Image (cartoon, rainbow, N blue to C red):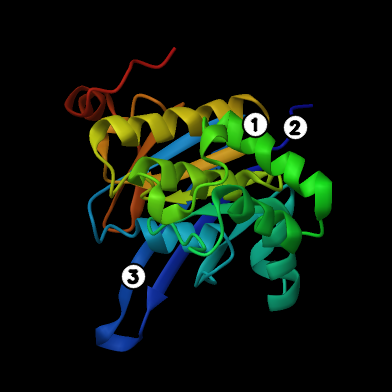
């Protein structure tokens, strides 16, 4: 029997407001992410990507549908249980790096480990391991304001990976980076998934420059998600599957 996907969105919709002023930001979206797979969802600003990602991570409740992580319907969990589940199983990478300026790179990663109950030498060793994976080991004792934009984003990824979450959700992780730095970040994120630091990853983006790195690309517009067609692949210059 085939094992279930570690992450799935099933018939998810989200409406804001009611009556004539209602806005349906997400419309009946379904997709799953396989083991060790990175899926990119690409679409223009206002297409519903960030709302969808917030629902996927249990930060926002859908109007309909459910999100299943490791067989657990997280939309059915109460607030406290959902927060605890997120801490253990879901890592977030935000467009704004959200790094702690008073801490160096190593300490920024250690904080995530401390919150999940790992402290002392084990936390320090794990933090250094993940910095090495993301090519930041020589920046371990540098503070965020001394890092380049690409290094700060890689540090944000390192922090998200610290507790080996099962799913990584990334919201426009290359939006503030130039082409080379953005591509480097996504390549290292794929390296982390390939190395087993996360079981699945979803990236929402409007940056078509990095779409050769994910394993699969979905398109989102007007709240709906669909697979990329041959015409889409040609226009986005995506690699041919297989």
Measuring 51% from the left and 39% from the top, which residue is drawn there?
139
**Viewed as shown, does residue 229 lie left or right of 133?**
left
Q: x, y percentage for residue 151?
A: 42, 41
Real-space Cα separation, disc 2 to disc 3, in angstroms:
33 Å
Q: Quadrant of the C terminus?
A: top left
Please tell me the numbered disc located at residue 24. 3
**Which comes before the other along the chain, label 1 or label 2?**
2
Is residue 228 positioned above or below 172 on the image? above
Please tell me the numbered disc located at residue 35. 1
Front one among 185 and 209: 185
- Dividing the picture into quadrants, the one containing residue 22 is bottom left
Q: x, y percentage for residue 100?
A: 52, 63
Q: x, y percentage for residue 41?
A: 38, 43
Measuring 70% from the left and 68% from the top, which residue is drawn there?
82
Under tag 2, what secondary structure?
Answer: loop
Query: Given this view, does label 1 or label 3 mark the residue nearer the observer?
Result: 1
Measuring 24% from the left and 38% from the top, which residue is drawn there?
178
Mark 3, other Cα within 10 Å: few <14 / some 14–19 / many ≥20: some
Disc 2: which residue: 3
| Tag 1 near tag 2, CB within 8 Å | yes
| Tag 2 near tag 3, CB within 8 Å | no
Measuring 75% from the left and 59% from the top, which residue is drawn there?
114
**Which comes before the other along the chain, label 1 or label 3?**
3
């Amino acid at each position: 029997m085939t094992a279930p996907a570690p992450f799935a969105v099933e018939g998810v919709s989200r409406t804001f407001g009611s009556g004539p002023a209602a806005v349906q930001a997400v419309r009946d979206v379904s997709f799953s992410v396989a083991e060790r797979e990175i899926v990119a969802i690409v679409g223009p600003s206002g297409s519903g990507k960030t709302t969808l990602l917030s629902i996927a991570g249990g930060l926002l409740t859908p109007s309909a549908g459910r999100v299943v992580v490791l067989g657990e319907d997280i939309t059915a969990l109460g607030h406290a249980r959902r927060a605890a589940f997120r801490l253990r199983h879901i890592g977030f990478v935000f467009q704004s790096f959200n790094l702690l300026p008073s801490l160096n790179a190593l300490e920024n990663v250690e904080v995530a480990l401390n919150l999940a109950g790992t402290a002392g030498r084990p936390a320090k060793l794990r933090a250094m391991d993940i910095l090495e994976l993301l090519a930041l080991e020589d920046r371990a004792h540098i503070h965020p304001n001394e890092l380049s934009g690409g290094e700060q984003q890689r540090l944000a990824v390192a922090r998200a990976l610290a507790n080996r979450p099962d799913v990584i959700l990334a919201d426009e992780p290359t939006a503030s980076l130039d082409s080379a730095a953005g591509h480097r970040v996504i390549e290292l994120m794929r390296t982390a998934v390939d190395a087993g630091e996360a079981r699945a990853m979803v990236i929402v983006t409007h940056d078509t420059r990095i779409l050769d790195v994910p394993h699969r690309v979905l398109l989102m517009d007007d709240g709906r998600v669909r697979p990329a067609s041959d015409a889409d692949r040609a226009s986005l210059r995506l690699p041919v599957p297989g």
